[in-house]
Image: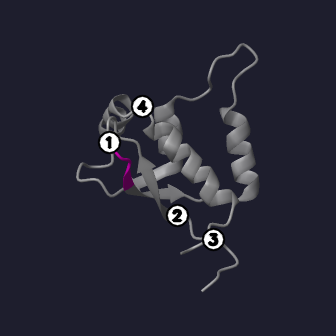
Amino acid sequence: MFKLKADPTFQAKVAFPVFGGASVDVQLTFKHRTKAELAKWLEEGRQTTEGSVRRTDEQTFFEMVVGWEIDEPFNKENVAILLDHHIGVALATYQTYIDELTRHREKN
């Protein structure tokens, strides 16, 4: 059933790139943001005029994701390991998050 106000979290599969092989779909639980909250969050994450980044990949990941369906616990240490060993995961997660919040996906 459609709700006027969205739930505070939602789940989506993210295609985690795997070096030398096919991507693996991993179910993540994301934090919902309203249109205004998303715009503010995106603006805060942009680079400063000096070119320095305001947030790290790890910070961005934690500001989007609140849980995952991976055998290891969802915590700072494991997120750091994930993002260090699988470089494309940060971008894939960010793209999926923005896509899920901003546009309709057709269901097959």
Q: Magenta part mainly helix, strand or loop? A: loop
**Disc number lying in front (3 or 4):** 4
Q: Which residue is mark 3?
A: 6
Spatial separation of the CA atoms under disc 1 and disc 2: 31 Å
**Disc number lying in front (1 or 2):** 1
Q: Is residue 33 visible?
A: no
Spatial separation of the CA atoms under disc 4 and disc 1: 14 Å
- Residue at 38 percent across and 47 percent down: it is 23
Q: Nearer the viewer, residue 20 or 88?
A: 20
Q: What's the amino acid at mark 2?
A: Thr
Q: Residue 96: give x, y in percent of width and height.
A: 55, 52
Q: Which residue is mark 2?
A: 9
**Disc number lying in front (4 or 2):** 4
- Residue at 62 percent across and 66 percent down: it is 105
In-image side of 6 versus 19 (left or right): right
CB contact under 8 Å: marks 4 and 1: no
Q: What's the amino acid at mark 4?
A: Ile
Q: Secondary structure at mark 2?
A: strand
Q: Which residue is mark 1?
A: 21
Q: Which mark is residue 87?
A: 4
| Position of 24 relative to 52 (above/below) | below
